[in-house]
């Protein structure tokens, strides 16, 4: 009986100059790899390709390549967000789709904690006074003893909770299936999305870490924001459309909450003249809170580990529910 492992052919939809591609040298010698952002790069291998890896938002190219590859067995995204990658052809297929969910969680957890300390210590005031040459002592807050409510208690939420707990904070998680967090070591309790407003009313820091899906779009709207404490801070490290931007701008301009720390937006890059640029109570990150020097290498390492599982016939990690979008 022939027990040899069949050769695999992997098509990468990405820039051929991407530095992390050097890690593909770790693949077995019998694996064929084709890389590019032009169908011509795959013309000789597309019929035999059984794995498709995505690192582009070009939906036409994704659809064209997917449809041209009759022998695919697995699709993987090097990114966590799937809004532009989950084209109808992939969504409606029976093939497994995996993503890089959780690969960037540590850096995002650090950004969340940075945001809490930024507002607790009023660092904008401190920086402004230094620049202006003024010595004006003021009162600062402690984060210890404060409550962090996390809307979207997945891997990013848990990375944030771990850091918050270490700083003496109390954590409440909110997720679609709270039962999945039974026995969680970081959150005092985890509740369903239906209870998000009461959690936001209880929280000093509201962390939004939910993916962008039809269910979560405008999940944080005027009613939810109105429930927040006047001293509350909203921190969005999930996706821009999860928070109603017009409603957020309104509460920030009125000073109805203390402030917001934002890494994600409805439109990126944020257009010139957008109110967020000029609001003193906004800490604005140009969607780079997870842009570490090794983020693409980390994502590629995750793919390679998942490929090893695929090759050995083991269950893949990070299988996406394509109907939910995460």
Image: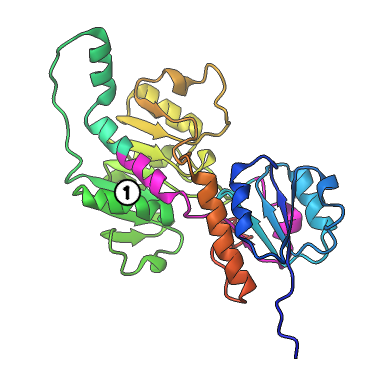
| 99 is within the stretch colored magenta | yes
Q: Which residue is drawn at 55% across and 46% down?
A: 296
Pick the front one: 183 or 203 = 183
Residue 188 x, y percent position in the rendering = 25, 59
Q: Residue at x 44, y 42 (%)?
A: 237
231 above or below 110? above
Report the number of discs.
Answer: 1
Return the residue found at the far top.
133
Q: Residue at x 21, y 47 (%)?
A: 167
- Would you say 82 lies left or right of 237 here? right
Q: Can residue 82 be seen in this view?
A: no
Name the quarter where the C terminus is drawn. Answer: bottom right
Pick the front one: 161 or 289 = 289
Which stretch appears magenta?
A: 84-113
Q: Which residue is drawn at 57% across and 28% down?
A: 269
| 181 is within the stretch colored magenta | no
Q: In the picture, residue 84 is in which quadrant?
A: top right
Residue 1 x, y percent position in the rendering = 75, 91
At label 1, counting other C-alpha atoms closer than 10 Å, the crowd grade (few under 14, some 14-19, many 20 or more) is many
98 above or below 312? above
- Would you say 250 lies left or right of 313 here? left
Residue for badge 1: 149
Q: In the picture, residue 32 is in which quadrant?
A: bottom right
Residue 117 x, y percent position in the rendering = 26, 35
Q: Is residue 80 visible?
A: yes
Return the residue found at the far bottom.
1
Q: Which colour scheme is used?
A: rainbow
Dot 1 falls on a residue whose secondary structure is: strand
Residue 107 x, y percent position in the rendering = 40, 44
């Amino acid at each position: 009986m022939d027990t040899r492992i069949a050769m695999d052919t992997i098509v990468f939809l990405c820039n051929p100059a991407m530095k992390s591609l050097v890690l593909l040298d770790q693949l077995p010698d019998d694996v064929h790899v084709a890389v590019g952002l032009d169908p011509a790069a795959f013309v000789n291998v597309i019929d035999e390709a059984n794995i498709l890896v995505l690192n582009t938002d070009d939906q036409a190219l994704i659809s064209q390549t997917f449809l041209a590859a009759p022998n695919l067995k697995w699709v993987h995204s090097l990114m966590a967000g799937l809004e532009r990658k989950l084209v109808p052809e992939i969504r409606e297929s029976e093939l497994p789709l995996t993503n890089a969910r959780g690969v960037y969680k540590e850096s995002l957890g650090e950004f969340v904690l940075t945001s809490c300390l930024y507002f607790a210590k009023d660092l904008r005031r401190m920086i402004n006074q230094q620049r202006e040459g003024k010595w004006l002592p003021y009162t600062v807050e402690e984060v210890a003893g404060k409550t962090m409510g996390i809307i979207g208690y997945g891997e990013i939420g848990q990375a944030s909770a771990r850091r918050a707990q270490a700083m003496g904070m109390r954590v409440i998680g909110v997720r679609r299936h709270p039962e999945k967090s039974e026995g969680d070591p970081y959150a005092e309790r985890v509740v369903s999305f239906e209870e998000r407003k009461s959690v936001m009313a209880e929280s000093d820091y509201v962390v939004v870490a939910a993916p962008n899906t039809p269910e979560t779009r405008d999940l944080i709207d005027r009613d939810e924001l109105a429930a927040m404490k006047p001293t509350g801070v909203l921190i969005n490290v999930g996706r821009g459309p999860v928070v109603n931007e017009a409603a957020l701008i309104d509460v920030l301009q009125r000073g109805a909450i203390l402030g917001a720390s934002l890494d994600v937006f409805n439109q990126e890059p944020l257009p010139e003249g957008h109110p967020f640029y000029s609001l003193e109570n906004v800490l604005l990150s140009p969607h780079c809170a997870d842009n570490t020097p090794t983020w693409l290498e980390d994502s590629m390492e995750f793919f390679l580990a998942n490929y090893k599982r695929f090759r050995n016939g083991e269950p893949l990690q990070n299988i996406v529910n394509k109907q939910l979008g995460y």
